[in-house]
Image (cartoon, rainbow, N blue to C red):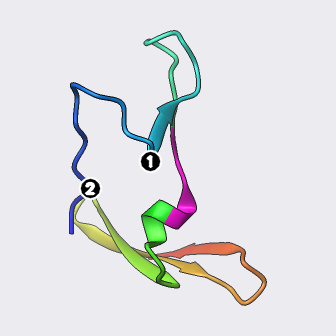
Amino acid sequence: MPIQHKTETASPVCESVSNSKKNSLIRIKSEELFQLRREIEIEHAGRIYRLQLTQSNKMILTA
């Protein structure tokens, strides 16, 4: 399911880390990304990647 971003209002899920638009970063809370799951799939450049939470609460990204 794709993540939708609203441009007119700031989302509590994402926040700008830097004030400079050119060098700004987007921060996404992992709790919002995983939504009570231990594993999610991310589609990038036609490939599917799997992001998993380990038992020690670390993240592993695999192709």
Alpha carbons under labels 2 and 1: distance apart: 11 Å
Specify whether 4 is left or right of 52: left
Q: Which residues are magenta?
A: 27-31
- Mark 2: secondary structure: loop
Q: Amino acid at mark 1?
A: Val
Seen as rendered, the residue at the extreme right is: 56
Q: In the rendered image of this protein, does residue 15 appear above or below residue 13?
A: above
Q: In the rendered image of this protein, does residue 31 appear above or below residue 48?
A: above
Q: Residue at 43% across / 73% down in the picture?
A: 35
Q: In the rendered image of this protein, does residue 37 appear above or below residue 17?
A: below
- The residue singled out by tag 2 in the image is 3
Q: Quadrant of the N terminus?
A: bottom left
Q: Amino acid at mark 2?
A: Ile
Q: Which mark is residue 28?
A: none
Q: Nearer the viewer, residue 25 or 62?
A: 25
Specify whether 54 is left or right of 41: right
Magenta-colored stretch includes residue 30: yes
- The residue singled out by tag 1 in the image is 13
- Which of the marked residues, 2 or 1, is nearer the chain's N terminus? 2
Residue 12 image offset from top left, x and y in percent: 44, 42
Q: Residue at 55% across / 62% down in the picture?
A: 30
Seen as rendered, the residue at the extreme bottom is: 55
Specify whether 49 is left or right of 46: right
Magenta-colored stretch includes residue 38: no
Q: Residue at 72% across / 74% down in the picture?
A: 58
Q: Quadrant of the C terminus?
A: bottom left
The part of the image, by quadrant, that contains residue 5 is: top left
- Mark 1: secondary structure: loop
